[in-house]
């Protein structure tokens, strides 16, 4: 699979997950704040916080192993 196809697949999959997350958390009642180093965030649904963590981990986990430099021997 080429690099372009992998990036398109990763971005499409995670965009669909984000869309489902946004639609699913609209009626959530339990909200919490995230304590950052400097400030706190606004109150967000707990499911949204967990979902964003999952999606960002999925993006990073899929993009880190991509080899952006071409190999000299063209072997995988």
Image: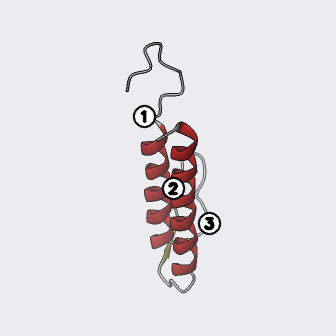
Return the residue at label 3: 42
Report x, y in % for residue 71. 47, 18
Label 1 SS: loop
Residue drawn where x is 59% and y is 46% of the image? 38
Q: Which mark is residue 32?
A: none
Scheme of colours in the image: secondary structure
Residue drawn where x is 50% and y is 85% of the image? 29
Q: Earlier in the sequence, mark 2 or mark 3?
A: 2
Q: Nearer the viewer, mark 2 or mark 1?
A: 1
Q: How many residues crowd mark 2 within 10 Å: few (<14), some (14–19), many (20+)?
A: few
Q: How many residues crowd mark 1 within 10 Å: few (<14), some (14–19), many (20+)?
A: few
Report x, y in % for residue 13. 51, 60
Residue drawn where x is 50% and y is 52% of the image? 56
Return the residue at label 1: 65
Structural distance between the alpha carbons of marks 2 and 1: 30 Å
Residue placed most toward the observer, 46 or 19 = 19
Structural distance between the alpha carbons of marks 2 and 3: 10 Å
- Tell me if 54 is positioned left or right of 2 in this view: left
Q: Earlier in the sequence, mark 1 or mark 3?
A: 3
- For the C terminus, the image quarter is top left
Circles 2 and 1: CB atoms closer than 8 Å:
no
Residue placed most toward the observer, 12 or 18 = 12
Above or below: residue 71 compared with residue 30: above
Return the residue at label 2: 35
Residue lying furthest left: 76
Residue placed most toward the observer, 13 or 58 = 13
């Amino acid at each position: 699979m080429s690099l372009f196809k992998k990036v398109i697949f990763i971005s499409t999959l995670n965009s669909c997950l984000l869309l489902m997350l946004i639609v699913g958390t609209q009626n959530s009642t339990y909200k919490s704040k995230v304590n950052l180093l400097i400030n706190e965030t606004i109150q967000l649904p707990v499911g949204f916080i967990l979902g964003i963590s999952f999606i960002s981990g999925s993006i990073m986990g899929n993009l880190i192993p991509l080899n952006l430099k071409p190999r000299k021997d063209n072997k995988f």
